[in-house]
Image (tube, rainbow, N blue to C red):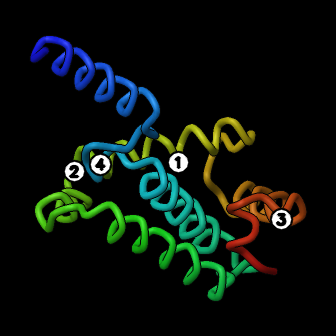
Amino acid sequence: MTSTLMTSARMSLAALLLGAPAYATTLADDAVVFDSMVQSVVVTEVVGGCPAISVNQRRMNRLTKKMMKQISRSGYSTGQIMLLRDEAYLARIAVAADEFYRANGVVEKNESALCALGKSEIAGRTPIGKLLQE
């Protein structure tokens, strides 16, 4: 009887684990937070390099609130939150931003290229474009 109960418990646990959504185990692995950070970096660089484009402050605030809600809801520790300043994590964000630029034809981050990218993102109503305005 105990064996049957244990088998049932194991099967229930396995079903629960298989049916559960995959959550990041650390804040550094959280896709919502990581993507928000990459978007923020790209927006900052575009705005800093293109005087014709500025931040859509309302949407940027919304992105920040979404990221903070994710952090709060996921129950990350203060120590994990502090890891957002870690050089290795920031390097991962920089690499992802550079990959975004390359994928969008930006070879050199000069005013012309950043303005063209920003205007293209705005026109395409992309997630990054929604954070920008002319």
Q: Is residue 60 left or right of residue 31?
A: right
* Residue sitting nearer the eye, 2 or 22: 2
Q: Secondary structure at mark 3?
A: helix
Whichever of callouts 3 and 4 sits on the residue coming sooner in the sequence is: 4
Q: Quadrant of residue 86?
A: bottom left
Q: Amino acid at mark 2?
A: Glu
- The residue type indicated by label 1 comes to Ala
Separation of disc 3 and disc 4 at Cα?
31 Å
Closest to the camera, between mark 4 and mark 1, is 4
Quadrant showing the N terminus:
top left
Mark 4 is surrounded, within 10 Å at the Cα level, by few (under 14), some (14 to 19) or many (20 or more) other residues, namely some
Amino acid residing under circle 4: Ala
Q: Disc 4 vs disc 1: Cβ atoms closer than 8 Å?
A: no
Identify residue for label 1: 97
Mark 2 lies on a secondary structure that is helix
Q: Residue at x 51, y 72 (%)?
A: 66
- Marks 4 and 1 sit apart, C-alpha to C-alpha, by 16 Å
Q: Nearer the viewer, residue 106 or 123?
A: 123
Q: Is residue 5 above or below residue 26?
A: above
Q: For the residues marked 3 and 1, what is the alpha-carbon distance in whole angstroms?
A: 17 Å
> How dense is the environment of label 2, judged by Cα within 10 Å: few (below 14), some, or many (20 and up)?
few
Q: Amino acid at mark 3?
A: Lys
Residue position marked by numbered label 4 in the rendering: 28
Q: Is residue 7 above or below residue 57?
A: above
Q: Please name the residue that numbered disc 2 is placed on.
A: 87
- Please report whichever mark, 4 or 1, sits nearer to the chain's N-terminal start: 4
Q: Residue at x 62, y 68 (%)?
A: 49
Q: Which residue is mark 3?
A: 119
Q: Quarter of the image containing the C terminus?
A: bottom right
Task: Determine the CA span between mark 1 and mark 2.
Answer: 15 Å
17 w.r.t. 101: above or below: above
